[in-house]
Amino acid sequence: MRLLLDAYGSERAAPEIECLRQAGVDVAWFNPRRLLRLSFRNHRKLVVVDRELAFLGGCNVADEYDSDGLDGGWRDLGIRVDEPTSAAALAQSFERMWSIAPFDHLPTAGIMPQASRGQDWEVFLAGAGRGGRRYRRQLHRDLGRARRIDVLAAYFVPTTRLRKLLIRVARRGLVRVIVPASGDVPIAQHATNYVLDELSSTPILAYEYTPGMLHAKLVIADDVVYVGSANFDPRSLRINFDVVIRIENADSAAQARAIVDQIQAHSRPCHGGRRGIFAKIFRMVAYVLVAWLDPLIARRKLRLLS
């Protein structure tokens, strides 16, 4: 058994990791923390069993998942992949992440391929400087031609282009977005609220999940489903190492929308725009930090690593 941990996100688990090592688990840390490379995270949540079965989504291994997300804990979702070729592609993606765990230099395109695909599925392996372009192109293409879009987002900070796409679709069809009412990362929550304030005058339907933290990452565009570890924000689009599976199947889309309906049943409409001047300024500053400054710093660090 091998366990690959993000050095930043899993730092609190370090004391317990030695017990796993003593039990025979081979443990590696992705990007051991150094100031220059602190921007780059292994954000993937992936379990592969015997290269034949895989689970991916937004779910971490943490105490927050001990409950059902209604009476306590976090609400999240994932997908079970048992189609042999796609499971093998996900297993291969783990191998490659394992091989670059020290992160001494920027991975090359040969080590970090952009995608693997089958008849009605495609696995996108986005990462810092590698793989994200194809994922972004396909996401933009699917959203741009859709008539109905549903988004579950723990952190909803879409780029300007994505916002324009969502508004355009909402004017000719339906766009539904559900975010947590109270997030686990305050600055990201304030940035999300800034975006929702800006979108409050558009036809986009926005809701806040109230029972607890909504950590799910899901996009449905007509009959296309995106599920994985990627958030709807610049960090997942351009910086983090993420994994997403795209499924083009009407039945899968219907099942995914049923999940969104269940989550909406425990959500309230989000009414933005009614805030004091200082609250608006604070949210705008948070948005600038998340949407512009963080990617800018990461791009500069990428140039030093290249």
Image (tube, rainbow, N blue to C red):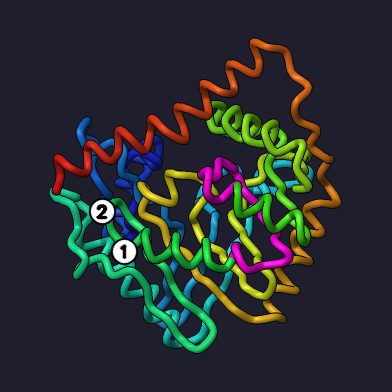
Quadrant hosting residue 2: bottom left
Q: Earlier in the sequence, mark 1 or mark 2?
A: 1
Image point (35%, 47%), residue name: 239
Of 94 and 228, nearer the camera is 228
x, y (%) of residue 50?
Answer: 39, 80
Identify residue for label 2: 28
x, y (%) of residue 7?
Answer: 31, 42
Q: Are marks 1 and 2 in contact (CB under 8 Å)?
A: yes
Residue type highlighted by circle 1:
Arg
Identify residue for label 1: 2
* Residue stretch rendered in magenta on the structure: 143-163
Residue type highlighted by circle 2:
Ala
Quadrant hosting residue 10: top left
Q: Where is 301 relative to 161, above or below?
A: above
Image point (72%, 35%), residue name: 181
Of 272 and 236, nearer the camera is 272
* Residue 65 visible, this orientation: no
Q: Residue 154 lies in magenta, yes or no?
A: yes
Of 296 and 189, nearer the camera is 296
Identify the image quadrant of the N terminus: bottom left
x, y (%) of residue 247?
Answer: 57, 76
Q: Where is 117 relative to 132, above or below?
A: below
Of 74 and 221, nearer the camera is 221
Q: Horizontal placement of 208 versus 183: left or right?
A: right
Tell me if mark 2 has few (under 14), some (14-19) or many (20+) residues whose alpha carbon lies within 10 angstroms of its own: some
Q: Where is 251 relative to 10, above or below?
A: below
Image point (75%, 36%), residue name: 200
Q: Horizontal placement of 206 versus 12: left or right?
A: right
